[in-house]
Amino acid sequence: MVTFLAGGTGTPKLLAGTDDVFTPAETTVVANTGDDVELGGLLVCPDVDTCLFQAGGILDTDTWWGIAEDSAETHEYVRTLSERAGLDGGPRYLPDDRQTAGRELARWRRFSAVGEFMHIGDRDRAIHVTRTSLLDEGHSLTDVTRILGDALGADREILPMSDDPVASIVHTPDGPMHFQEFWVAHDGEPPVESVAFRGAEDATATDAVLDALSDPVVIGPSNPITSIGPMTAIDGIATALRKTPVVAVSPFVEDQVFSGPAAKLMAAEGFEASTAGVAEAYPFVDAFVLDEADRTDLERPTIRTETTLDTEEDAARVARAVREALEVVT
């Protein structure tokens, strides 16, 4: 068995080509929930859903978000109504006293659906309606994710990192904002002073996650700060990673990041925006997979290959390098 830590698109892109290297039956995915938001009363779990949709064969792999060929009539009409009513568009947080009221799992990230700033398709929204309703019936997020995985025919187990609320908050000169506001609504443009994982100090890893982390772990080329950082901010997960073999694929080629805001966020947290900085951020990693053009000298075992992940063939090549690295450290 092998467990993948997933956030954003890096690890899902790697998983797209793993079936011949790591079969779905032998893989578990632990997904980041620090990016989750409550939007219009519905709990949206972007990273969990990307993994669920991929495992169910319905992921939109053009955007690596949402369901392929989904309509978005509800989303468009919500925005139309807001414009006709003269309401301000963009992210609209619920009042401070509402951020810790109601559904505990949604703390510190409650947004109104007025001016809906995240594109949500109609079938995608049905997932959020079902998830939220099951949570309100008393199921845990772990239970709900398994139920949805079964309904979608997911071929591997997907686990949320915790059943407790953890919110990734980006601190900017204009004040704190949830990561989804920073990345989706503002295209990652605001300057970043620091990143905090609100609630992580009180969150616990579930027994299912801890059991999965007793197996060798693979971290794809995900953002070390806001994709993997919320997980390692939880004591139980951080401790488990120190005790099990871990292989990571760098999201950089030396100081060039493949995509996303990783460079900006790493610099804000005091890490060099490079493969060397990733190694510093991941002291628990036992071996790395680097691009063949990346000559960074790490004091840990390193396997090199072309780490581009544009196709399933690319992903299979990187997966084989990951398997080789695991054989070195297990």
Image (tube, grey):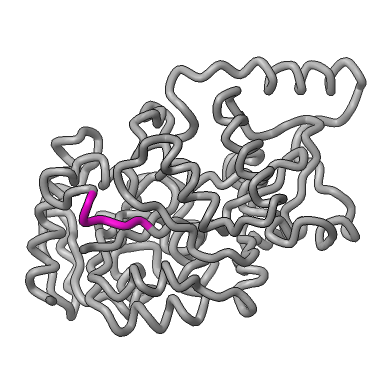
- Compared to residue 88, the image places residue 307 above or below, namely below
Residue under the image location 61 percent in, 68 percent down: 197
Total marks in image = 0
- Magenta-highlighted residues: 25-29
Image coords of residue 293 (percent x, y): 14, 53
For residue 64: magenta? Answer: no
Give left or right: position of 310 versus 139.
Answer: left
Residue under the image location 8 percent in, 73 percent down: 328
In this rendered view, identify the residue nearer to me: 296 or 239: 239
Image coords of residue 84 (percent x, y): 88, 15
Give left or right: position of 143 versus 314.
Answer: right
Image coords of residue 116 (percent x, y): 73, 32
In this rendered view, identify the residue nearer to me: 183 or 72: 72
Question: The C terminus is located in which quarter?
Answer: bottom left
Residue under the image location 44 percent in, 48 percent down: 8
Give left or right: position of 324 versus 124.
Answer: left
Give left or right: position of 21 versus 201.
Answer: left
